[in-house]
Amino acid sequence: MGVVVVTGVPGVGKSTVMGAAEEYGYKIVNFGTTMFEEAQNEGVSDRDDMRKLAVEDQQRLQKQAGEKISQMGNVVVDTHASILTPSGYMPGLPEWTVRALNPDIIVLVEATPEEIEGRRNKDATRVRDKDDIGLHQSVNREYAATAAVITGSTVAIVENHDNQVDVAVEQFRKILGK
């Protein structure tokens, strides 16, 4: 199958759904972790310091991480289609990154904004910024579609509704062709 990119807004249950991929022979790779490994090769010692690098260096590291991941075979990539910043939504799959990854499929894990808000409120281990969840999911769809146009990949949506994770995992399994 190759590279499968999985995205979703914080609190949607992306990690839970992706966990099913391991049962079907896929390795789960976190994009940010891979990018940090590339940065460590250049002397960056703290993951948070990557944000302080020059934009050109960050872009180069994104590309290098994408190229490294694309060589790993059947992988499911845990990343974000968009990141909410104080100045707006930043693409998590900019052109240079998505070309390097060259995914076969981009999967959006979604739920209703009310379900996601409820999950966020129950998760005391995370501190999340307030945002318009419906808008964020819409932006993710637009960014995913743009990335698909660049690479020729397909875009699939997995609905991860409350108390129905087994249904979402089955949807994901079918997308993987298993």
Image (cartoon, helix red, strand yellow):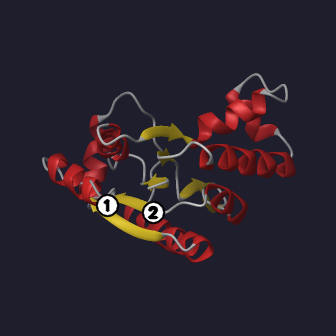
Name the quarter where the N terminus is drawn.
Answer: bottom left
Q: Which disc is residue 175 wearing? A: 1
Position of 35 with respect to 43 (left or right) is left
Q: Residue at x 86, y 45 (%)?
A: 54
Q: Residue at x 69, y 66 (%)?
A: 95
Q: In which quarter of the view is residue 101 placed?
A: bottom right
Mark 1 vs mark 2, CA separation in Å: 8 Å
Q: Which residue is mark 2?
A: 105
Q: Secondary structure at mark 2?
A: strand
Q: Earlier in the sequence, mark 1 or mark 2?
A: 2
Position of 32 with respect to 80 (left or right) is right
Q: Position of residue 130 (x, y in %)?
A: 45, 51
- 75 or 6: nearer the viewer: 75
Q: Residue at x 46, y 62 (%)?
A: 106
Q: Residue at x 77, y 33 (%)?
A: 39
* Residue type marked 2: Ile
